[in-house]
Amino acid sequence: MNKISILIADDHKIVRMGLKSLFAAEKDLTVVGEADDGDVTIRQALKLKPDIIIMDLMMPKMDGVAATAEIHAKLPDTKIVVLTSYSTSDTIAAALAAGAAGAVMKSADDSTLLTAVRTVATGKRFISPEVKGILAFDPPAPALSPRQQEVLASLVKGFNNTEIANQLGISKTVAKEHVETLLVKLDAANRTEAVAIAIRKHLVKA
């Protein structure tokens, strides 16, 4: 029987060690590599071509959503299960939209994670009950000023602060302040999450 090969991507060594120990005890699973940031995860994925990647959503250099999108585009047969300790729906939704096949809370028990791995390995999607509960809760969209709507539209286009400033005829400092205000208003951890919220809540046109 061919074992399911797994790449573990998490910036916390203790988490990687725990996952490695969990999978090592299973006869049908084998850990083929580890990564501690998004960039390394992509390089390891392309090199090892694992069956499954366990992906932490919040990692340095490149977050899990961006890494998921790039890996899914290059290795569509590799299934990605995202792990999150955050209780916001938008980052999880963005990861699923980027190509993740599964989503599990870091607080989930071992059996849930093992079920997730084995389920996505068969080509099916697995969303844990806790994640389903988070995705079902969707607070109303915040009210945005016309200027904030313009800045948000620029974020959706992928503009950085300098490009936003040039587009709107404002200083880079003011552009940065608008972006930071938007992240707070949208309860977004980063620009990627802000864009996901904006599109899902129809605050701007995709």
Image (tube, grey):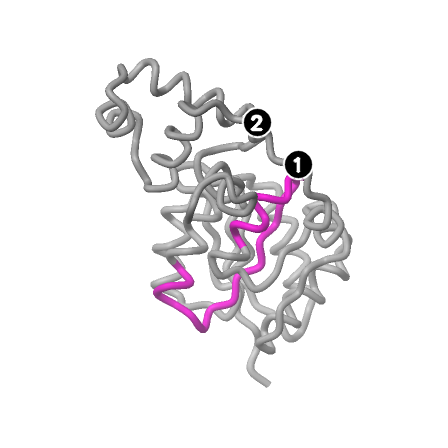
What x and y, as percent, mark residue 199?
A: 49, 45
Residue 53 vertical position relative to residue 161 in the rendered view, above or below: below
Find disc 1 in the rendering and name its residue.
140
- The three-letter code of the residue at mark 2 reads Ala
What x and y, as percent, mark residue 103?
A: 63, 56
Depth check, front residue: 39 or 126: 126
Distance from label 1 to label 2 (Cα)?
A: 9 Å
Left or right: residue 192 versus residue 88 is left
Whether tag 1 and tag 2 are in contact, CB under 8 A, the answer is no
- Name the residue located 51 percent from the left edge and 26 percent from the top edge: 144
- The three-letter code of the residue at mark 1 reads Pro
Residue 140 vertical position relative to residue 94 in the rendered view, above or below: above
- Name the residue located 77 percent from the left edge and 56 percent from the top edge: 129
The magenta-colored residue range is 71-95
What x and y, as percent, mark residue 122?
A: 60, 78
Find disc 2 in the rendering and name its residue.
143
Report the number of discs.
2
Depth check, front residue: 24 or 103: 103
Q: Secondary structure at mark 2?
A: loop
Q: In the picture, which quadrant includes the N terminus?
A: bottom right
Residue 77: which quarter of the image? bottom left
- Name the residue located 58 percent from the left edge and 44 percent from the top edge: 90
Residue 93 within the magenta-colored segment of the rendering: yes
Q: Secondary structure at mark 1?
A: loop
